[in-house]
Image (spheres, rainbow, N blue to C red):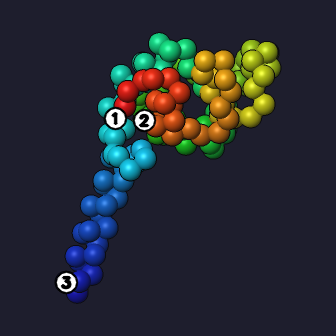
Amino acid sequence: MKTIKKVSLIFGILIVIGVTYSSVNGFFVKTNNLDDFAKCLTSKGATMYGAVWCSHCKEQKTVFGDSFKYVNYVECPDVPTVCEQRGITGYPTWIINGEHKEGTQSLQTLSELTGCPL
């Protein structure tokens, strides 16, 4: 019985750590501490295009946690003409320095593309 309790405790701790942190290329970054990073992305003109029903967009938003509110985001179904003009063909798509980056991007990749520190 004691072994089961120990395993359950360890598993519970790992879940808490997993929920609190996101792994970024081997480093751990608190997901609730990304406000400055998200604001930097915005100041550099990075924009994410997506759709509320897109599971990969939800995944990308989850990486930012509450800090996503500071990211330039365009909900394409609400403004299809804008997304069509920008050449958006799939979700999520990031436009950074005029380049299209399709799919969920790691924080490290976004940092490298924009120069924004994590």
Left/right placement of residue 36 relative to residue 108 reads: left
Q: Amino acid at mark 3?
A: Lys
Residue 13 seen in the current view: yes
Decide which of tag 3 and tag 1 comes sooner along the chain.
3
Read off the residue under disc 3: 2
Which quadrant of the view contains residue 45? top right
Q: Amino acid at mark 2?
A: Gly
- For residue 8, the mark is none
Which is nearer the eye, 99 or 34?
A: 99
Q: Is residue 71 above or below residue 106?
A: above
At a point 23% along the width and 83% down the height, the residue shown is 3
Q: CA distance from mark 2 to mark 1?
A: 6 Å
Read off the residue under disc 2: 65
10 Å neighbourhood of mark 2: few (<14), some, or many (≥20)? Answer: some
Secondary structure beneath disc 1? helix
Tell us which disc is closer to us: 3 or 1: 1
Decide which of tag 3 and tag 2 comes sooner along the chain.
3
Secondary structure beneath disc 3? helix
Q: Position of residue 81 (x, y in %)?
A: 79, 15
Q: CA distance from mark 3 to mark 1?
A: 35 Å
Left/right placement of residue 111 relative to residue 87 reads: left
